[in-house]
Amino acid sequence: MIYRDLGRTGYKISAVAYGGIVSMNDGQENSDRYVSWAVEQGVNYFDVAPSYGDAQEKLGNSLIPYRKNVFLACKTGQRMRKEAEEEMKASLEMLHTDAFDVYQLHGISSTEEVDRAFGPGGVMELMRDMKEKGIARKIGITAHSEEAALKAIGLYPFDTVLFPFNWHMMTAHGMGKRLIAEAKRRGMGVLCMKSMIERAWTDDGERRDSKYPKSWCKPFDTETQADLLTAAVKFAYSLGVDTIIPPGNYDHFSFAVARHAEILAEPFGEADRRLLEDHLEVVKDRPFFAV
């Protein structure tokens, strides 16, 4: 496993992180197997959220033998302090820990949400207190809106940012360029989600009947689209992200773990660029969220 600095946090984390959705809805035995394999391969960063079904429970149990040797990131989707505090206590209990290595303000999608989080009685009051008390060693933000993320990091010195630095959205729409530049300027740790995503699902039926129903968007197939998938991951690493968090299924996670060293050894090049640009003509009118 290749390890990289997570910004200026002082953490050296695996170039591929484990997204908690991999453990979601697959049963405790499978979660234990996935996590054990991940740790054996050198994965040392695990990320989960209360909104991921039963993932906190399953991942928390799976991590009991390994907790002291890994970084654990959790999130709150709440915007007000009272509700967030209740959620945070439940997360600590289910994950069998007394502190998070990273605790993130999760899923910010508008500047109005940023205003609520930073306003009177907002969740940022709790986040600051958690960091002061050591319950959250680092504080991060996750977002799907670049504008909202930029506003938030201008209001508080977050340690990390988790964002979809995706080949499709950046190439076709420029989404993420300003954010990664600002995050790097500030020395933030940069975590990348959705590096392997091709496009939005056509509809709920396509998602339900696919090989990857736990993925919020349609990922490249690990078998029939391996070249495109590899190029997309190379693209994400080429931006300077510190780690990628693959979609929420074991196939993509294990693909990334198995291929990451090869991918990093052969950086994004002209052939990869042409491959993705040609494919963009097929999917450019199908972004996976509003821009």
Image (spheres, rainbow, N blue to C red):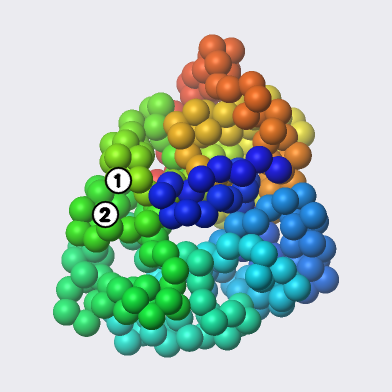
Answer yes or no: is residue 39 visible. Answer: yes
Looking at the image, which residue is at 41% across and 27% down? 171
Q: Distance between the residues labelled 2 and 1?
A: 9 Å
Q: Give the percent coordinates (x, y) of residue 196.
A: 58, 39
- The three-letter code of the residue at mark 2 reads Ile
Identity of the residue drawn at 74% across and 57% down: 39
> Is the C-beta separation of discs 2 and 1 under 8 Å?
yes
Name the mark nearer the viewer: 2 or 1.
1
Above/below status of 95 relative to 42: below
Which is nearer the eye, 222 or 157? Answer: 157
**In the foreground, 227 or 208:** 227
Name which residue type carries label 1.
Arg
Which quadrant is home to the C terminus?
top left
For label 1, count other residues whose C-alpha is less than 10 Å away and answer few (under 14), some (14-19) or many (20+): some
The picture quadrant where one finds residue 92 is bottom right
Q: Residue at x 58, y 85 (%)?
A: 93
Q: Residue 168 carries which label?
A: none
Estimate the x, y position of residue 161 in percent, counting from the top left.
Answer: 39, 52
Q: Is residue 174 above or below residue 121?
A: above
Q: Kindly state the secondary structure of the residue where label 2 is placed.
A: helix
Percent position of residue 17, x then y = 61, 52
Measured from the top left, where is residue 110 in percent x and y?
Answer: 26, 57
- Who comes first in sequence, dot 2 or dot 1? 2
Asked whether, in this view, residue 102 is left or right of residue 36, the answer is left
State whether residue 214 appears in this view: no
Residue drawn at (79%, 54%) of the image: 40
Q: Quadrant of the N terminus?
A: top right
- Circle 2 is placed at which residue position? 153
246 and 259: which one is in front? 259
Residue for badge 1: 186
**Near-viewer residue (74 or 12):** 12
Q: Is mark 1 on a helix, strand or loop?
A: helix
